Image (cartoon, grey):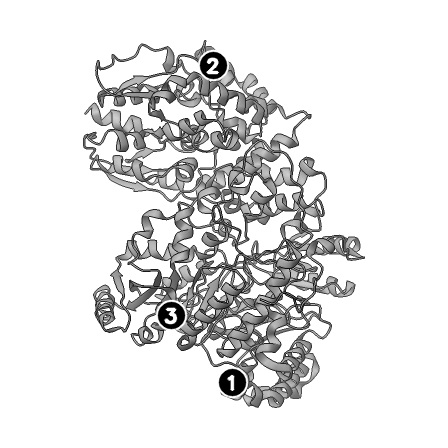
Amino acid sequence: MSTLSPFVLLPSSHARTQDQFPTASELERQLRAKIRGEVRFDAASKAAYSTDSSNYRHIPIGLVIPHDELDVINTVAICRSFNAPILSRGGGTSLAGQCCNAAVILDFSKYMNKMGLVDPVGRTVHVQPGIVLDRVREAAEKFELTFAPDPATHSRCTLGGMIGNNSCGVHALMGGKTVDNIESLDLLLYDGTRLTVGSTTETELENYIAAGGRIGGIYAGLKRLRDMYAALVRKEFPRIPRRVSGFNLDELLPENNFNVARALVGSEGTCAIILGATLRLMKSPQYRTLVGVGFEDIFIAADHVPQLLTHKPIGLEGMDGHLLDALRKKHKLEDDLSLLPEGRGFLLVEFGADSQPDADQHAKDFAATLKSLPAKSTCRIYNADEAHRVWVIRESGLGATAVVPNQPMRWEGWEDAAVDPAQEGSYLRAIDALMREFNYTSPMYGHFGQGCVHMRFNFDFESEAGVLAFREFIDRAADLVVAHGGSLSGEHGDGQARAALLPKMYGPELMQAFREFKQIWDPDNRLNPSNLVDPHQPHEDLRLGADYKPWQPKTHFAYAENDGSFAAATLRCVGVGACRKQDAGTMCPSFMATGEELYSTRGRAHLLWELMQKEVLPGEWKNDQVRESLDLCLSCKACKSECPTSVDMATYKAEFLSHHYEHASRPLFHYAFGRIDRWARLASIAPGFVNAINNAPLIRNIIKSTLHIHGKRTMPRFAKPFMRERKKSQPETGKDVFLWADTFNNYFHPSTMRVAYDVLTDAGFRVGLPSQHLCCGRPLYDFGMLDTAKEYLLKILDALAPQLAAGTPIVVLEPSCASVFRDELTNLFPNDPRAAKLRDQTLLLSEFLVKHAPDYRPPQIDKKIVVHGHCHHHATQSMKDEMQILRATGADVQLLDSGCCGMAGPFGFEADKYEVSQTLGERVLLPAVRSNKEAIIVSDGFSCQEQITQNTSAKPMHLAEVLAQSHQR
């Protein structure tokens, strides 16, 4: 690396946050008068859409979420009258900056996400731009068809975005890039022209030109462009599987049928707005077998890709040992990592067939040939379950490596180059040498079967020297790619990250051709300007930058993994959008219910990050728009475990609310729900009397109105606490265990406490109980009442001193209470050794029985058991032990992928949250309960049980009740 940079520092995004579109207010007014969908020019919406998954940040003029095509047409017409630029956006997961701009953003994902019927004969389907890829694939699979390109973001990326980027994924090896799978595009141009384009015969081309008008002019311009540059395109365009950089001018060649639709794929919204697309579907291998192959290092693995490709796999992925190291350091997928063969460089080779025996045989034949490879290798053939787990490892690449404990953050910026697979080993060695020169490190993973390698570097984007070193590095890296006959981008597109480097790859004549192509479609340069043609520089408009100086407020939580900085904690979100999935897991329930970016983990993280900049969002902790966004967060903690970078929105919400209401009055229901342990303790003196009052029609309505409780919610019934009951006699010998008396089971469901006490006693343990009223304060965190929460925890640490000193296991029945001890406790008291002891000694009942009672055998149950795991159980522990105990009963046990139940403590009781709560419950959980009327429904969480009992006739049981029931038979 040279000591004197050939580049100069350019303004970061912070230098431009005050830039204003002069007529934004009038533009907003006219849009609101005409658009049926949503028009949002508020600070929070602009903050949430100011970046994507890249290093760049542009504050948009405003946001339009169109309801239909007419909304799009009207938006463009109104923007045109103001000369306002427009940016089309789907899932917002682009890594090169092409999804953020100082423009009016059209977000198609919320409403324009429909599709037509699959044509199984013609193997096509028509879609709107906002539809998520997985919805298309699910519909196609009913006919044993698929849309081949499948990037790692398949659960949330939209087809419009895939077309804009020319996305690829694992199975592009089988069926090509997005460009290879587009039949036609329905377009809207900035000047209002509408047209549908696809392949074009010479006769059709001449007819279009002869018809004249704007469309005739477009075709005439494209024909002239083709004729002028055809020879140069044929000569200079890299002939590799993953040439994604630049415009697809090769699709205009006669041998490619003058395919205008495919020429526009990968144009990143710079030429036209996509209103719809007809996709080409292909046969989907219904049976697949995956083989993992391990090599000494990733370079040797890459060397062998061409030889492995001769076996005709449908997917061939690579990853190095650094990716696995990152997952281990984050304690993610640890059980799954053992599935990989020995080595530090891995290739995942997938075979498809019409039957499982055929696929298995193909894999076995392939594995047998590995012995003849020049380099030593190890391999493993996976069954279907194992293959799924291994694919999760591969798909975790970006998020797993972005934020790693005790390491600098890693960034995109040179993450997507592609070469011919025959050049892959050479390229990787060359880029590795360049990395060493710059003192950079990066994992290597990606689509090795097509020569596309993904990387994330420890770039320094916070100092002038670091920014300039980054710029010099990518300049020289581009030279390496070009020298290897490759493409700067292999699927992520160029955007701001790479567009300025395109002259290295294409030269001045083809760059002029690109400029002319853009001018044919968008002569006024109003569609996603400064991308691809006349672009901003890659080290310009950085989200961080040498002038990045975020606000560093004093906090309650320690944020040890982020060096004690709340600002650094909000930076953990790298925009990959895993919180926008809607079909599996728990994260993010509020997005699943609303489809709203502001109610996703990513959207909230972006708002909090922007709050720390003090540039777009005013008011610091008192900002009401940030509070409104967080208000719909269910504090499920799923993001802490499911987010690839472990964004912890439940903690951020509690932190924000604690300061938001500092020296200010709170709503009454904060006190009513937040301090429920106090009211429950008082009610336990005469629970029958209190229940009667609560359920008297007039009083009940007054209470609900006063406490903002929805009219359809039923008040939970208080009970005589278990702590006041006479207990079963204890064994004289046996190990000690301490049974925590949480507020919910002690004062509402004492039967659960009773049977848990019996189960532990029958298992031979001496069960200790609290001698005073204690509460972990779980509901306090929902409202940010952290000073009170800390008081509760300090009282507990004092009260449990004997148990902590003795190392006595502490069994907690309520998962949300266990999560306080396992999570919040040490984040609030990082330097108190008692807090660490309580965290480590806290166990759920199932965990305790598995770890401390290995000889425990529950009697057999001859019924089906349907299990719904509490969000905090999934997030801070694991359902593994729970399932092991239940399956030991011999029952048919089904664990639902039901996500959040929607009740989430007080959330589901609040009047303005009821609809969201019910939507979440009806997504999976409640229908599953209703369809399993004869089954035992197991749900350990108090709020989960409330959601079930208030919406079905079922009587859910805690694990302890199931185990006690079996003992009684």
| Marks 3 & 2, CB-CB < 8 Å contact | no
Q: Residues within 10 Å of mark 3 (few under 14, many from 20)?
A: many
Q: Residues within 10 Å of mark 1 (few under 14, many from 20)?
A: some
Q: Which three-letter amino acid code belongs to the residue tagged 2? A: Arg
Q: Which image quadrant: the N terminus?
A: bottom right
Which residue is drawn at the image coordinates 66% and 59% (left, top)? 71
For residue 216, above or below residue 432? below
Query: Would residue 59 be seen by someone viewing this image from the given angle?
Result: no
Which residue occupies the foreground of this view, 155 or 761?
Answer: 761
For residue 567, above or below residue 27? above
Q: Which three-letter amino acid code belongs to the residue tagged 1? A: Asn
Q: Quadrant of residue 774?
A: top left
Q: Residues within 10 Å of mark 2 (few under 14, many from 20)?
A: some
For residue 689, above or below residue 447? above
Q: Please provide percent x and percent y for residue 317.
A: 38, 65
Q: Earlier in the sequence, mark 1 or mark 2?
A: 1
The residues bearing labels 3 and 2 have C-alpha atoms spaced at a distance of 65 Å
Q: Please provide percent x and percent y for residue 795.
A: 48, 18
Which residue occupies the foreground of this view, 812 or 636?
Answer: 812
- Identify the secondary structure beneath mark 2: helix
Q: Which residue is mark 2?
A: 681
Left or right of 121? Residue 2 is right
Outermost residue on the front side: it is 3
- Identify the secondary structure beneath mark 1: loop
The residues bearing labels 1 and 3 have C-alpha atoms spaced at a distance of 35 Å
Query: Would residue 696 be seen by someone viewing this image from the given angle?
Result: yes
